[in-house]
């Protein structure tokens, strides 16, 4: 069997490693457009913030290490065309084009940054943060003494993490978000309001409901223009989201979402024969809404990729089915940490649920132990059955680990009543006798 993978990051390399273990006789070849494989982009803001110095930590394995396992990895190879009927790939390497064949194919081409449709993004001093060189270039740029003020465009996970990184680097920070509040796609308003407070305490100038229109300056950035004014700045970091790298598939007729994400079933199969897909270029099945959704997270990419690696080289037996994603994710913003799992209130409404919610404020642990602080939790649940559909927690201590417990609650279909009586661990430095999760479950009516 000739198994070919397009893309050498999380999903692709997880599939390659698993496929080799399942089928020692398969021929496995990975084509990667860049020169780096097994790259974890999630580490980039922390590298820029100087939380670690060696950029190589973000690339876990090398092509040589995979070669030792019998997996051929070819970097600097870009796929420009897929002929699914003839099972052929058109590949460009160092200016030359050649054709490769496959028996079974996995597409794991990831995503690239979405840039706003404005002029001036090509000026010196405008940065994005998606690949390793982006992180290296940005870190070098902010070492220049002339760089004192940084403007971050977009307040998703990366935007907030970049803002924090710049604060750690001693910069004055402005944050521009076109929505009416920060990180609107991930957290509900009752939770996201606390990010604003934390950033403002650190001196961040926050502009919500404001859109970038132009980057000012001759060759180098001198400022930005929005729909509400002009502001001087020394450097701009654009963090306005990502879109799937799937343009080369347009002529194949493959089934995609409107944003280009490849639609896959629960086995990871696409609409094309003998073609699978996973990672930031593809959809993932949501176990609560029951829909194929676009959630570009490393956790889902690794898990679905690993499962595809098993399915794609099987010669007998039943294929595995993906149990589903909850979109469980988390972020740190200065002293705050926050996590979410399952559906937000709006996501639950769009999925057709009759929704009820409760938002509460409590403490992370008992008052006589040092470090007690506020914690906020929002619970999203179904009217009538009281089945928990989603949860969000934010606080200064212990919020993210609690969201892991809530992920179990959502995935097992727990009711708010069951959550209210759940036997969570208690000791004064860690929790109160009635944990915030118990309280939320008991308050939900």
Image: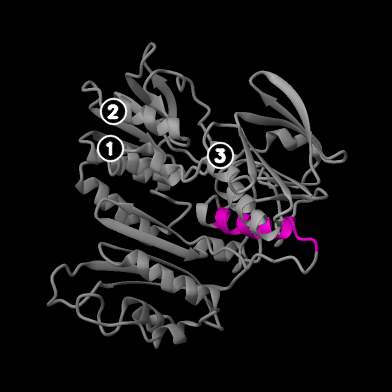
Q: Estimate how packed mark 1 is, as few (under 14), some (14 to 19) or many (20 or more) residues with alpha carbons within 10 Å.
A: many
In the figure, is residue 364 to the left or right of 445?
left
Residue drawn 41% across and 22% down? Answer: 215
Distance CA(mark 2)–CA(mark 3) = 32 Å
Residue underneath mark 1: 166
Residue drawn 80% across and 61% down? Answer: 315
Distance CA(mark 3)–CA(mark 1) = 33 Å
Residue underneath mark 3: 63
Q: Which callout, 2 or 3, points to the residue nearer the camera?
A: 3
**Span colored in magenta:** 300-315
Sequence-earlier tag: 3 or 1: 3
Q: Which callout, 3 or 1, points to the residue nearer the camera?
A: 3
Residue drawn 80% across and 34% down? Answer: 251
Sequence-earlier tag: 1 or 2: 2
Instruction: State whether residue 2 is above or below residue 323.
Output: above
- How far across and down, in percent of the image, does residue 274 sit? 80, 50
């Amino acid at each position: 069997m000739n198994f070919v993978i397009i893309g050498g990051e999380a999903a692709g390399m997880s599939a390659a490693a698993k496929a080799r273990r399942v089928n020692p006789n398969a021929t496995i070849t990975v084509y990667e457009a860049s020169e780096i494989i097994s790259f974890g982009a999630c580490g980039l803001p922390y590298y820029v913030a100087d939380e670690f110095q060696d950029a190589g930590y973000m690339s876990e394995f090398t092509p040589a290490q995979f070669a030792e396992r019998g997996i051929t990895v070819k970097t600097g190879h870009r796929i420009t065309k897929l002929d699914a009927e003839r099972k052929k790939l058109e590949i460009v390497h160092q200016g030359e084009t050649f054709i490769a064949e496959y028996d079974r194919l996995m597409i794991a081409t990831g995503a690239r940054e979405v840039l706003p449709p404005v002029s001036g993004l090509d000026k010196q001093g405008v940065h994005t943060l998606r690949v390793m060189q982006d992180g290296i270039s940005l870190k070098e740029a902010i070492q220049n003494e002339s760089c004192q003020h940084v403007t971050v465009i977009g307040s998703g996970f990366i935007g907030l993490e970049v803002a924090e990184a710049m604060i750690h680097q001693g910069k004055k920070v402005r944050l521009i978000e076109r929505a009416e509040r920060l990180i609107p796609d991930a957290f509900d308003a009752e939770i996201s309001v606390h990010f604003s407070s934390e950033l403002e305490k650190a001196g961040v100038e926050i502009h919500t409901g404001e859109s970038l229109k132009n980057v000012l300056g001759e060759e180098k950035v001198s400022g930005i223009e929005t729909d509400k004014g002009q502001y001087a700045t020394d450097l701009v970091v654009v963090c306005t989201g990502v879109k799937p790298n799937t343009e080369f598939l347009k002529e194949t007729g493959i089934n995609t979402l409107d944003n280009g994400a490849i639609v896959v079933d629960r086995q990871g199969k696409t609409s094309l024969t003998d073609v699978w897909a996973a990672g930031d270029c593809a959809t993932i099945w949501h176990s609560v809404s029951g829909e194929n959704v676009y959630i570009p997270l490393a956790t889902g990419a690794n898990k679905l990729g690993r499962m595809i690696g098993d399915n794609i080289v099987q010669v007998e037996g039943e294929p595995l089915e993906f149990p589903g994603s909850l979109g469980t994710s988390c972020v740190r913003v200065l002293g705050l940490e926050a996590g979410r799992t399952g559906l937000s209130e709006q996501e639950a409404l769009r999925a057709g649920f009759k929704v009820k919610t409760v938002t509460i404020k409590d403490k992370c642990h008992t008052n006589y132990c040092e470090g007690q602080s506020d914690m906020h939790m929002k619970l999203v649940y179904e009217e009538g059955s009281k089945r928990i559909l989603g949860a969000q927690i934010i606080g200064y201590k212990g919020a993210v680990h609690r969201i892991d417990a809530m992920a179990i609650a959502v995935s097992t279909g727990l009711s708010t009543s069951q959550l209210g009586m759940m036997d969570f661990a208690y000791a004064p430095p860690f929790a109160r006798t009635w944990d915030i999760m118990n309280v939320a479950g008991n308050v939900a009516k």
